[in-house]
Image: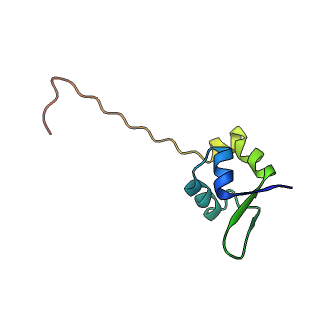
Amino acid sequence: MKYYTIGQFSKLVGKNIQTLRLWDKEEKLKPHHVTEGGHRYYSEQQINQVLQVPFVKKNRKVIGYCRVSSNKQKDD
């Protein structure tokens, strides 16, 4: 089985390295193994896991912001 560094894995799945570290910390996606030096390695199976739609949607936060201004609006 082939293993990928966190940098390689982030490029393959389209996620930021910081996001992967956060998922590791929150135990949403643990690396396949971590070396004694602290390097994270991910498996090919984990690539498929992350690329599945339910996994991405489950870990996604959506924030909306809307501001409407008009000519009749008073100054704050």
Image quarter of the N terminus: bottom right
Image quarter of the C terminus: top left
Q: Please provide percent x and percent y for residue 56.
A: 65, 43
Q: Please provide percent x and percent y for residue 2.
A: 82, 55
Q: How is the image coloured?
A: rainbow
Q: Foreground residue, 10 or 54?
A: 10
- What residue sits 67% from the left and 75% below the top? 37
Q: Where is 74 relative to 18, above or below?
A: above
Q: Quadrant of residue 23?
A: bottom right
Q: Name the residue at the bottom extreme.
A: 36
Q: Please provide percent x and percent y for residue 54.
A: 70, 41
Q: Foreground residue, 38 or 51?
A: 38
Q: Please provide percent x and percent y for residue 12.
A: 68, 45
Q: Is residue 65 left or right of residue 24?
A: left
Q: Quadrant of residue 52?
A: top right
- What residue sits 74% from the left and 48% below the top? 47
Q: Name the residue at the left extreme.
A: 75
**How many callouts does the rendering have?**
0
Q: Quadrant of residue 42?
A: bottom right
Q: Name the residue at the top extreme.
A: 71
- What residue sits 21% from the left and 24% below the top? 70
Q: Is residue 5 left or right of residue 60?
A: right
Q: Where is 69 relative to 51, above or below?
A: above
